[in-house]
Image (cartoon, grey):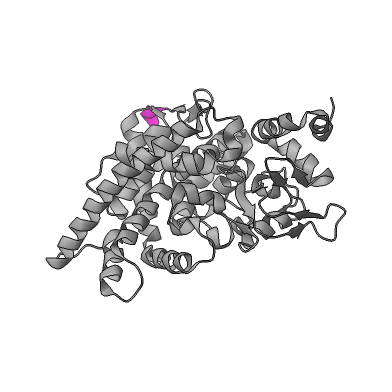
Amino acid sequence: MASYLERFDLAPTEARWPLVRRWMFEEPLPFYAELRSQRPILEMPELTLVTRYDDCVTILRRHDAFGVDLYKPKQGDYFMAQDDTAAHWREKSIMKAILDFEQLPGMRAFVATKAAALLQAAGGTIDAVDGLSRAVPIALVQEWFGYSDSNPKDLFEWSYWNQIDTFWNQPFDSVVVPDQAAIVKKREEALVGMRQYLIGLVTKRGEDLKAGKANNDPATRLLRLSLSGALQFDVPHVVLNTGGLLIGAVETTSHAAINALEGILARPDVLAAARAAAALDDPAGFDGYVFEAVRFKPAFPYFFRTCHHPTVLSGNTPFAKEIRPETTVLAVTHSAMFDPAIFPDPDRFDPRRPLGDMFHFGLGIHECLGRAIGAVMIPEIVRQCLRLPDLKADGPVDRRGGPVPESWKLSWSAAGH
């Protein structure tokens, strides 16, 4: 059979991106290996793929040269839709400050208890997506982020459509999304309901503050900062940033947890070692199995950026190429995490690889705000599953033709649990 690049070069120009996208999701690792060795920067009219580790790092760290322009139509004034602006600097700093690292052990304990309870109640079979990987982060949002009186179904809808529209409904996704306008409409409808709820939540927290009632959730912390007048941070931005906590917490957690568990269950030798590590009281030796499984199948295989000024990638190599302004660039971090220059013997499953070399939570100024929370919540959901006796998948993960896991049936021996 002809190589990927031979087939690419023979295809009509308009057929190349659809072909490449299919390979990215159906045959990623051999495709990326060929690109890294022969054409690490792959240009098409729609976008340019970048597949080597060092070039992906350059793109994600150099926000002056590669910006998040494509976020803006989806996220408006939210700081993550801006690059190195005053609002981004200030608001991300505020949000990091109110998400205390000191709370991480308590959050992990909450996730462990909640996941174990959901599995216990399921009685030996569960839809791991709606019943667990989405349900647990929704419960955490309610318990820890102040959404205590919310409807879980609403929280899912608000998070889901914002995630789908922002990350999976970009102009270059038109080759697989037949009705992009319908997804935009879903996101806009979700925002109406979410904004109404959040305005009510922040108003209630303001009334509690006036009455001297002590709340310690993020909305209250943000409101205290806003009302102090010490920062340029008004009440509408309290609403906006409180919403960001929800949007970032649910679907990305679910996607990563399902991909990790799927990858571990598919490798019998890895499964046995991971189960032994999961059984220990100290999870320190377990989490690497999850993040290594996600390296093989990340929730986000790439990060998209827009080039702002001419930038040479793969400099001082035979593949050096100048990326021109207005080019949409995909930093294919899935490929980068198999670059042998950084990951020795990259096709080997090694739970001891450093998380800091991976891109699971992004890199640079747009690194995931909830990185520390995700780094305990995702592995703990998987850990609780692997503590079940005789756990098995009853078929493949069902993505219903879309980009994220929508349903996956698991079963286990309930008598021994």
| Quadrant of the rendering where the C terminus is positioned | top left
Please state if 61 lies on the left or on the right of 4 as rendered: left
Q: Position of residue 150 (x, y in %)?
A: 25, 44
Q: From this view, report whether residue 149 is shown above or below residue 367.
A: above
| Residue 222 visible in the snapshot | yes
Q: Position of residue 92 (x, y in %)?
A: 44, 64
Q: From this view, report whether residue 345 is shown above or below residue 57.
A: above
Farthest residue toward the top? 395
Please state if 59 lies on the left or on the right of 218 as rendered: right
Q: Position of residue 388 (x, y in %)?
A: 44, 35
- In front here: 373 or 416? 373
Q: Which contiguous range is marked in magenta?
A: 413-417
**SS assignment for the magenta stretch, majority:** helix
Please state if 135 lies on the left or on the right of 41 as rendered: left
Q: From this view, report whether residue 13 is shown above or below residue 231.
A: above
Is 211 part of what is drawn in magenta? no
